Amino acid sequence: MSVADTTPEPTLVVQHVSKSFGSVTAVQDASLSAGAGEVTAIIGDNGAGKSTLIKCVSGVHRSDAGEVCLDGHPVGFASPEEGRARGIETVYQDLALVDDLAVWQNLFLNRERTRGAGPIRFLDRQGMQREAESMLQRLDVDVPSVRERVRRLSGGQRQAVAICRAAGWGSRLVIMDEPTAALGVRETARVEELIRRLRDDGLAVLVISHNFDQVLRLSDRVWIMRQGRVVDGFRTAETSAEELVAAVTGAQRAANQPRGRSQQP
Amino acid sequence: MAAPTRDREPRQADAAPSRAPAWTARARRTVRDPAFWADWTVVVALIVLVVVFASLSDVFLTAGNVESILVASSILVVLAIGQTAVVATAGIDLSLGSILTVSSVVLGWAHAGGMGIAVACLLCVATGLLAGTINGLVVARGKITDFIVTLGMLSVAYGAALVISDGRPVRVQDQFLLTLTTGSLGPLRYNVALAALVAVLGHVVLFHTRFGTHLLATGGAPEAARAAGVDVARVKIAVYAISGLMGAIGGILLTARVGAAEPTTATTLLLNSVAAVVLGGVSLFGGRGSILGPVAGALLLTALINGLTLLAVSQFWQPIAVGLVVIVSALMMRFRR
Ligand SMILES: Nc1ncnc2c1ncn2[C@@H]1O[C@H](COP(=O)(O)OP(=O)(O)OP(=O)(O)O)[C@@H](O)[C@H]1O
Ligand SMILES: [Mg+2]
């Protein structure tokens, strides 16, 4: 394929993936890639199929056709757990934290450390709290205390905890669906900082966003989705807001440059 | 812990000029915080109640009366713990009283049939577990509202108790059960000790095991729990089974105390178990709860009835008093965050 000339090989390569729900075709023949140490953005109008596509990658949905490759190996996840086991973590649009549990309990949810013998095992609460503190510290995330209930955190702190959980488990690829949609300006800036830190740690980061300014600030490359298809792709440094808007709405370019650069932004 | 931030500096600056040690400032802030009182409503209420009754009655705080409160509350404590497990997952078990009844009747039937007390108690426990597991399976796999499922089980279990016992109480005279009610382990009666043991185990399971964490996550945010890979359906089945088990243990305690297995409706026990859970600050929306709270709630309800009896208040007033206490505490709990 035409990805061959991008060196090194991208962490994630999606090829010709399609997904329908009954008669609704949500994703059609979509191809894109995301490299390690890069922030890759997906933009597109409401209903363009962005969320559905990343769910096909993370294992929430099973694609009808096409191939998802992680580090060059084809993967076909039947469930998010399988995806997670292979190093794909997703931060969902609705955060997916448990409000009434403490920060450390959320970071370790379903990955709790226990001590004990045989079937009689007890939580290593101290150990997990310490580890949670260092997880947050490593990414410079600031919460009042790891023992605080998530309910009492601000929107930005909650999002940071969710991202931290996604990044904290030796993941290779972190996917975020509109991570700053519900946040104010200052909190958005902090979350963006956090995303850059993940990138600098060498993770592949895939971000869905509706905010063109954010995409231009944050990402290294951009894929454009329209009506279920990945219709275009750019190196962020080589594009502009006007060009992105045009691509998303399908103005002018659609006719003369149909999918010319979609494989190698 | 995280480094101090711009956010928190002003608050520290506020505290500094007062020169009081940090903990007094914190204590003062805590005491002024309505959320603190809401969290400890039941303990505060229990203390107030004890002080009031102790000042009105010389008998109330005597060792003998305290013991009889503890003994009388032991069944309710056990049931409240079972109810807590279910309510913390945002469910409710309306069949708990009926499960107690049918388990107790099975015990009496097995004992009357000449089986040893050990076998009879095992069958009793198996009955409770079975009924609870059926509740859980229908709720979790059949995806039917807990309210309807357990209302159905309430009727089925009570009917089964009537069928098995032919509607008549069965005398159960047995040394083991007699010892359970009258014997003592140090200062604690065996039945009180058993309830205390169940409470300690409940606390450990809820706060010191993976299952406990998954239980609270299932109740608080089922979607988030599922996304994290928690088997939400299995947790639901487990909590109803636990509730059934607690019903059966309650059945053994009640049979021991009465000396007979009676096919009664046990409605008051069911209602009080829910009341104790609400008093104990367990959120009916799930995700939040403790064991200490409902245990204190059960003690509070029992002490209330005991005190009213000592003061020779007519029995007819007792349900009104119980209801008022529950409603007032629920109002106080609205201040929780
Ligand atoms: N589970 C589902 N069942 C049926 N149709 C679905 C399902 N999920 C998505 N769709 C449909 O697929 C299409 C793409 O939806 P998707 O959520 O992927 O869009 P999106 O690009 O994420 O939009 P937004 O920007 O609003 O989040 C929509 O028409 C949507 O209605
Ligand atoms: Mg979406």
Image: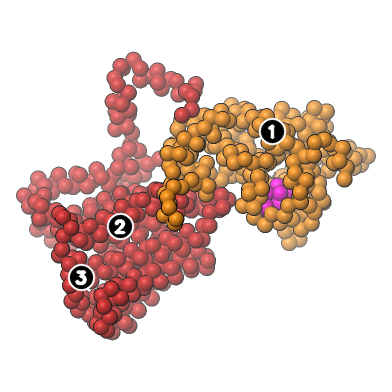
Q: Can you tell which chain is drawn red? A: B
Q: Which residue is mark 3?
A: B176
Identify the residue position indicated by label 2 in the image. B198
Q: Amino acid at mark 3?
A: Phe
Span colored in magenta: A53-60
- Disc ID at residue A202: 1
**Whole-percent x and y of residue A177?**
66, 42
Callout 3: chain: B
Task: State the residue lying farthest toward the left.
Answer: B58
Q: Are marks 2 and 3 on the same chain?
A: yes
Q: CA distance from mark 3 to mark 1?
A: 67 Å
Q: Position of residue B245 (x, y in %)?
A: 35, 65
Location of residue A152 with respect to A115 vertically, above or below: above
Residue drawn 58% across and 50% down? B227
Q: Which chain is orange?
A: A
Mark 2 or 3: in front is 3
Disc 1 with disc 2 on a shared chain: no
